């Protein structure tokens, strides 16, 4: 799947502490719900013992997101906190088991759903930033990313004949025949579902025992024959050919090709995101309340002290710090945020961009252009690596956010394309090897400080690039280096709550206190808390 700025980098618009846990799990749940035609009364969820989910599925919102998806809800639905109770009220029994399945990806979901008439299984992974991939359905190896209308047809023999007839009746981007143990499944990826009329026509050449239709879960669909002008920084520089095109303009051209959008449509999408973020920042400063978190409302006092001149003179950095903190507090209180590129690193980029734009007297269109510029840097990272801390540590989240934010800040300052890229390279270089070790399993400590550090790093690197400091190592090579570092990083230091600050006595005590508090106030009998 070719990366989209709005699918994979700036988004989703969501609630919850983690995009890979909450938004990714929700999208997996939505696809599983469609696999059962929205009717099921039992769900078995299995997590591999050596993955990240056994220790994080409750505290980081995987259960909340998965249950919300099974209910058909959206990533920003205000009912998500009550998803476990809502399933219980619908008489759906959820069973969570920790197993030895040997899954390669740390965020692997094995789901088995049933009702009195049928049972289906699904294996899927949450890749990071809300992006997912279904790897198997009922034992058939597939690749479903939620960017197509997927029609699945279970066939008893003569699958090749069905394929031939389907090609003559229906225009699809891809039609695949999967076989396992003598059974056949035809998968159709298209801009629309295969209709019942077409299915009936297909029955003349093959026995179709079941048909399922899985709706897209990503905002930007894929289509046959997508081509984009570049996928690496080096390719982008060749494409620009020394013209000095602003990075935001190149990002717009990329997303126009990827999503089949007009320039106005791309800008409108990013402006909507900017306005959501500004509302969330205001909400955070005004104050948030949520029981199941480590940190309370802190940015209000910072705002008061900043306005009265009682803080050290940090200039624009103080406003950036305020906005970053406000967004992190909204995230931790289950308010609406935008994963940019992830929920755990949701604040560094937008907080830095919006604060600096206001300091410079710039408007929302300038903010949107800066965010687009950052999105293209994110495309280069996502294409070659990951945003998921479970795979890359916090260098994948905070490091990527800093790299993206540095380019955005240079863009707002009127810097050149070369300077934007240099700032990105320097910012990511500065954060290689950063681990992920959330205290008490909540994405707050040291995540707040790391978001502040990422924004501060971005500002410093932006100014260094504007002064033509030499990044030495090109951005593409820095991304490859980060990928290598992540492969060398111990599993315990990659968002498992098994290393770093997460295993300190204080962290364990906080976790026990929050768990006891949650268990005492839940009041449901869903079996979710254990």
Image (tube, helix red, strand yellow):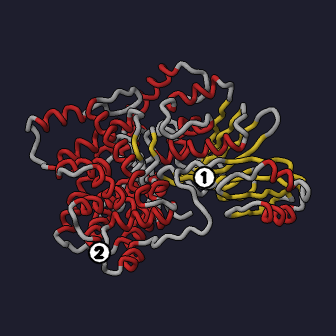
Assign a secondary structure to mark 1: loop
- In the rendered image, the vertical position of residue 183 relative to residue 33, given as above or below: below
Residue appearing at x 18%, y 36% in the figure: 303
Q: Nearer the viewer, residue 64 or 231?
A: 231
Assign a secondary structure to mark 2: loop
Quadrant assignment for the C terminus = top right
Residue appearing at x 15%, y 33% in the figure: 304
Give x and y (percent) for residue 318. 17, 45
Q: CA distance from mark 2 to mark 1?
A: 36 Å
* Residue at the spot of label 2: 244
Mark 1 closeness class: few <14, some 14–19, many ≥20 residues within 10 Å = many
* Residue at the spot of label 1: 146
Residue 502 position by quadrant:
top left
- In the rendered image, the vertical position of residue 416 relative to residue 36, given as above or below: below
Residue 298 position by quadrant:
top left
Give x and y (percent) for residue 431. 32, 60
Give x and y (percent) for residue 21. 51, 44
Q: Which mark, by number, is residue 429?
A: none
Q: Earlier in the sequence, mark 2 or mark 1?
A: 1
Mark 2 closeness class: few <14, some 14–19, many ≥20 residues within 10 Å = few
200 lies left or right of 125: right
Residue 174 position by quadrant:
bottom right
């Amino acid at each position: 799947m070719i990366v989209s700025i709005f699918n994979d980098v700036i988004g989703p618009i969501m609630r919850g502490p983690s995009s890979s846990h909450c938004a990714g799990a929700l999208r997996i749940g939505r696809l599983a719900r469609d696999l059962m035609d929205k009717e099921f009364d039992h769900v078995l969820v299995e997590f591999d013992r050596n993955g990240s989910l056994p220790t994080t599925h409750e505290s980081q919102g995987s259960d909340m997101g998965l249950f919300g998806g099974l209910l058909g809800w959206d990533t920003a639905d205000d009912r998500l906190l009550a998803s476990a109770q809502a399933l219980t009220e619908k008489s759906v029994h959820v069973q969570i088991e920790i197993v030895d399945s040997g899954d390669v990806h740390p965020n692997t979901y094995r789901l088995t759903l049933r009702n009195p008439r049928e049972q289906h299984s699904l294996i899927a992974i949450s890749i990071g930033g809300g992006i997912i991939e279904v790897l198997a359905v009922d034992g058939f190896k597939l690749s479903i990313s939620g960017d197509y209308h997927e029609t699945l047809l279970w066939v008893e023999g003569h699958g090749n004949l069905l394929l031939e007839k389907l090609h003559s009746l229906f225009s699809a981007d891809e039609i695949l025949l999967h076989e396992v143990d003598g059974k056949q499944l035809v998968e159709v990826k298209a801009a629309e579902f295969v209709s019942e009329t077409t299915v009936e026509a297909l029955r003349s050449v093959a026995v179709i025992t079941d048909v399922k239709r899985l709706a897209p879960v990503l905002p930007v669909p894929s289509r046959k024959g997508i081509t984009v002008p570049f996928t690496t920084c080096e390719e982008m520089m060749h494409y620009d050919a020394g013209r000095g095109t602003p990075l935001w303009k190149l990002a717009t051209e990329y997303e126009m090709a990827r999503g089949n959008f007009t320039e106005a449509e791309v800008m409108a999408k990013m402006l909507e995101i900017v306005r959501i973020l500004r509302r969330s920042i205001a909400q955070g400063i005004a104050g948030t309340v949520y029981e199941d978190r480590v940190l309370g409302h802190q940015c209000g006092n910072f705002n008061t002290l900043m306005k009265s001149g009682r803080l050290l003179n940090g200039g624009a950095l103080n406003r950036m710090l305020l906005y970053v903190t406000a967004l992190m507090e909204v995230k931790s209180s289950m308010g609406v945020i935008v994963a940019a590129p992830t929920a755990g690193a949701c604040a560094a980029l937008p907080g830095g961009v919006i604060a600096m734009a206001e300091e410079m007297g710039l408007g929302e269109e300038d903010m949107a252009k800066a965010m687009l510029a950052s999105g293209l840097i994110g495309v280069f990272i996502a294409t070659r690596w990951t945003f998921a801390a479970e795979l890359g540590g916090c260098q994948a989240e905070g490091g990527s956010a800093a790299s993206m934010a540095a380019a955005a800040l240079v863009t707002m300052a009127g810097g050149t394309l070369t300077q934007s890229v240099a700032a990105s390279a320097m910012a990511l270089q500065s954060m290689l090897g950063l681990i992920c070790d959330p205290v008490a399993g909540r994405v707050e400590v040291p995540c707040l400080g790391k978001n502040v550090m990422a924004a501060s790093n971005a500002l410093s690197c932006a100014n260094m690039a504007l002064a033509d400091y030499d990044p030495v190592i090109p951005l593409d090579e820095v991304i490859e280096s980060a990928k290598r570092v992540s492969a060398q990083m111990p599993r315990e230091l990659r968002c498992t709550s098994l290393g770093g600050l997460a295993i300190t006595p204080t962290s364990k005590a906080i976790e026990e206190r929050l768990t006891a508090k949650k268990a005492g106030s839940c009041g449901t009998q869903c079996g979710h808390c254990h």
